[in-house]
């Protein structure tokens, strides 16, 4: 049933009616305290209450414009006859929060769900953009299942250094390698530092933030075209108000995430992720989001779709351009327009129309930025799933951002037990390493990191950088920034910290990577591996108290989305009693 066929709800059908519309002592208290805030009965009586979940923070540069955007969302809500209430939520600031924002994604998801449940909220505007914020907000909204719409933060403007265009993240890794190799000096490095991030918004490469924004739109959870608008563009403010207006109508139509999300819509999202050469992180987030919606999305489905969807977005770190160029080339609507033959176009969206309706007539204005299917950036999906005796539950790689010569490679392992071990030895001139070596980092997964930090793009040893080496096979149970590049095998599962095969690798062991065959194998006999497994000793727990203990006890492995096991299982949580 589409929005036009839905029975229009009445004021007494709203959740908030239980708080504000009943003639009893508790409603008296709710109304009187609303008057205390400064609202009049005319502001809220019989109107949809819209919760604006704002992840603004002084320490989150991606969301620095959200104070103003929240006001613009409110303007739209008021215009449409709703009652907006801004609800602050934890801000997951990718650059600053340690050891990883991934440690706290599920905390924000829980907070979002419980804010929407415990307060008199009829519909939600989810304000996010920085990497883990987008899936966290959506996961919480899926579990709560009231009308909700996502308002993406938008990418920042392109960076600049001495006439060179800089992409956040991608060029940080590039020029850090050149600094370590002695090819640029500290003065140049400082200039790059000051010029790479200009203004509000998330990374302007096709990193995790841009990938997840595009996925949210493809799933049908944003207004058409919303995810491509740069944060500093005036169109972004207009989109915020339009989002506020639309959520009020969604409440009256009772258009919920469960009406929008389906196996078909998740297939569309995976197809989009492949076509843009999206972040490897999106696999974990999509699996978790689908599970919240009661949809099984196994790693095998990603690989199936990857085999027939080429990369057509010429964006860093896979290609040449940045998100600002992508926006002016037609943005996500134009890219989806080029993908119509590979999409399920009848999927419902928050606009009230189908995905096909939303992208009807959209076409690129620059065929080099958004390529046609017959002239792709890469003729295969941007993400590939691997299996083998080193990754029995799976691992991932982004071939489109790797040195193609390394996609079939066998080499001796150089093993680092953890990040500190790697940092201490990687530039040791006596390190036994060559360009053919396979760098291995362990104890960096969901529990080992803890929180599965973005350590997967291991640095090239300094002595090899000075020889001109710029890529090597690297593998870990960690994640990698979506802005990163290189032949990096990630998300190896089960993780080493809980005794996965990665824990058994020793320096000198041969490791074989074969992307074409989707294989990752440790070339050691089963008898030897059994002996090593018997001798393996589990490390001590990372935490003795607090949130960390709950995280360790309930976090799932990468192939299951790194969600808490108790958040995507069990009967729905009932509505709160009001006493």
Image: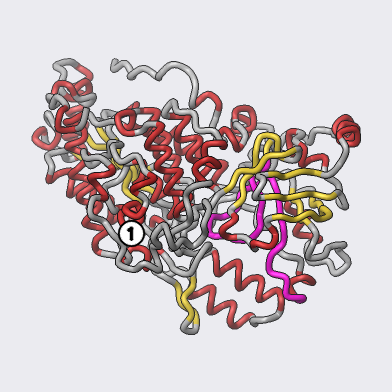
Relative placement, left or right, of 342 versus 249 is right
Badge 1 density bin: few <14, some 14–19, many ≥20, Cα 10 Å? many
Q: Secondary structure at mark 1?
A: helix
Q: Position of residue 449 (x, y in %)?
A: 67, 44
Residue 139 visible (yes or no) = yes
Residue range (magenta): 466-492
Residue 449 visible (yes or no) = no
Query: Toward which corner of the image does residue 252 lie, by quadrant?
Result: top left
Query: Which color scheme does this rendered protein use?
Result: secondary structure
Q: Residue at x 39, y 47 (%)?
A: 55
497 in relation to 567, above or below: below
Residue 470 lies within the magenta run: yes
Relative placement, left or right, of 125 versus 376 is left
Q: Position of residue 119 (x, y in %)?
A: 30, 29
Kindly report the secondary structure that dominates the magenta region of the rendered protein: loop
Q: Position of residue 197 (x, y in %)?
A: 46, 68
Q: Which residue is mark 1?
A: 331
């Amino acid at each position: 049933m589409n929005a036009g066929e839905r029975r229009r709800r009445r004021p007494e059908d709203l959740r908030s009616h239980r708080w504000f519309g009943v003639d009893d002592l508790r409603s008296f208290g709710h109304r009187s305290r609303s008057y205390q805030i400064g609202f009049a009965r005319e502001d809220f009586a019989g109107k949809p209450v819209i919760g604006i979940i704002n992840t603004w923070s002084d320490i989150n540069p991606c969301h620095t414009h959200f104070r103003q955007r929240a006001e613009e969302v409110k303007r739209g809500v008021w215009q449409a006859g709703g009652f907006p209430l801004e609800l602050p939520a934890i801000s997951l600031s990718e650059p600053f929060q340690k050891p990883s924002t991934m440690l706290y994604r599920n905390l924000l998801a829980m907070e979002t769900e419980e804010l929407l449940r415990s307060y008199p909220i009829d519909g939600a505007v989810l304000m996010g953009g920085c990497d883990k914020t987008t899936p966290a907000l959506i996961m919480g909204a899926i579990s709560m299942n009231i009308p909700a719409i996502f308002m993406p933060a938008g990418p920042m403007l392109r960076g600049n250094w001495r006439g060179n265009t800089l992409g956040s993240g991608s060029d940080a890794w590039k020029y850090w390698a050149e600094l370590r190799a002695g090819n640029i000096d500290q003065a140049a490095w400082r200039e790059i530092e000051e010029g790479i991030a200009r203004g509000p918004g998330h990374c302007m490469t096709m990193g995790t933030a841009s990938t997840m924004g595009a996925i949210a739109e493809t799933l049908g959870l944003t207004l058409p075209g919303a995810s491509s608008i740069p944060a500093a563009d005036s169109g972004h403010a207009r989109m915020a108000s339009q989002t506020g207006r639309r959520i009020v109508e969604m409440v009256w139509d009772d258009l919920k995430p469960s009406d929008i999300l389906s196996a078909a819509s998740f297939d569309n999202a995976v197809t989009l992720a492949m076509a843009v050469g999206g972040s490897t992180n999106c696999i974990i987030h999509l699996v978790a989001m689908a599970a919240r919606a009661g949809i099984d999305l196994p790693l095998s489905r990603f690989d199936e779709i990857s085999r027939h969807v080429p990369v057509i977005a010429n964006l860093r770190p896979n290609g040449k351009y940045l998100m600002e160029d992508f926006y002016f080339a037609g943005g996500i609507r134009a890219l989806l327009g080029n993908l119509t033959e590979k999409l399920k176009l009848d999927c419902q969206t928050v606009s009230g129309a189908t995905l096909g309706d939303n992208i009807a007539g959209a076409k690129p204005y620059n065929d080099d930025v958004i390529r046609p299917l017959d002239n792709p950036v890469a003729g295969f999906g941007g993400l590939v799933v691997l299996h083998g005796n080193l990754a029995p539950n799976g691992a991932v790689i982004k071939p489109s951002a790797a040195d193609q010569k390394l996609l079939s490679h066998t080499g001796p392992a150089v093993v680092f037990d953890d990040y500190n071990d790697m940092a201490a030895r990687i530039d040791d001139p006596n390190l036994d390493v060559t360009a053919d070596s396979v760098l291995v980092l362990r104890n960096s997964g969901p529990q080992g990191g803890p929180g599965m930090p973005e350590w997967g793009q291991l640095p090239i040893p300094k002595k090899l950088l000075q020889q001109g080496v710029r890529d090597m096979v690297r593998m870990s149970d960690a994640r990698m920034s979506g802005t990163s590049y290189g032949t990096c095998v990630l998300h190896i599962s089960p993780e080493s910290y809980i005794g996965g095969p990665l824990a058994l690798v020793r320096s000198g062991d041969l490791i074989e990577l074969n992307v074409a065959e989707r294989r990752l194998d440790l070339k050691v006999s089963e008898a030897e591996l059994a002996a090593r497994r018997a001798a393996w000793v589990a490390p001590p727990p990372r935490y003795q108290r607090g949130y960390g203990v709950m995280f360790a006890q309930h976090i799932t492995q990468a192939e299951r989305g790194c969600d808490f096991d108790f958040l995507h299982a069990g009967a729905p949580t009932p509505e709160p009693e009001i006493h």
